[in-house]
Image (tube, rainbow, N blue to C red):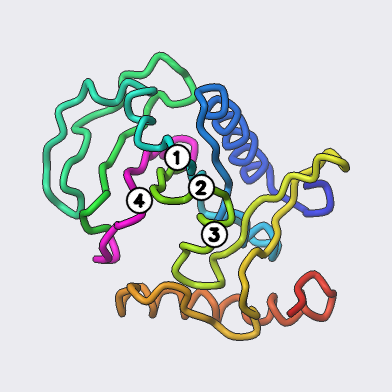
Amino acid sequence: MAQYTLSNRTIKIFADAVAIQARLLELGFKSVIAGGFARDTFFGLEPKDCDIVVYGDNTDKLEEALNLGVWDRTGDSFFARKVSGPLRLEDPLFQGGTWCDMYGTMNQDAEASDRIIGVMQLPHKNIDVIVYTDCDEAQDVIDNFDFNINQFAMYQDLAAGTTYPLYFGATSLKQLALVRNDASQQRQIKVANKYNALRHAIELAYKENRLCD
């Protein structure tokens, strides 16, 4: 990401995320850094956190692979089941995290999580590992995001030996587009506010040909 000016905090988050991706791959799981982190770095903003999305035909095995099943899951806020304490994982990359089951339940925006099995939250790293279902490829993950403004991902250019954020949506970013029809009104307002805050940066990206229709 040499062509982007990043803060030390963002560089640290990205380095941790790449290390987690490498460990997931060792365990047999594919993943992509997509959503807000990639979008914000594309526009030169400081990302709040980083989402790593795990996809493929074996994502239902991740809990077993990470020995998450040893915990009793209780509680019923927005999640049907929730780990009631820190995960006892030997792998230092995942220590200090919590696991939340979400499939078939409701998330914070009161939307049915029909595509998310669960989320491993690593707040000390500002990283969430989100486990998708029914997504065989990274593009499937991006196509399942609710709005086009979120359809960014970190692209690894193997030939150049670098990684940078790109927009992978099918619609123009000159206007906000709803990709999924299940976003709550609260969610729509939140994303619209985010889009409006990015409007000038989007216009500039088109002028610089970093975005094109």
Do the residues under discs 1 and 3 have CB atoms within 8 angstroms? no
Dot 3 corresponds to which residue? 142
Name the residue located 80 percent from the left edge and 69 percent from the top edge: 210
Inspect the image, locate mark 3, and give the three-letter code of the amino acid beneath it.
Ile
State the CA–CA distance, disc 2 to disc 4: 13 Å
Specify which label sits upstream in the sequence, 2 or 3: 2
Query: Which residue is outermost to the bottom?
Result: 175
Numbered circle sitting on residue 116:
4
Inspect the image, locate mark 4, and give the three-letter code of the amino acid beneath it.
Ile
Name the residue located 39 percent from the left edge and 48 percent from the top edge: 133
Specify which label sits upstream in the sequence, 2 or 1: 1
Name the residue located 36 percent from the left edge and 30 percent from the top edge: 61
Dot 1 corresponds to which residue? 57
Residue 49 in the image, given as x and y percentages of width and height:
51, 49
Q: In the rendered image of this protein, does residue 71 appear above or below residue 140?
A: above
Numbered circle sitting on residue 136:
2
Inspect the image, locate mark 2, and give the three-letter code of the amino acid beneath it.
Asp
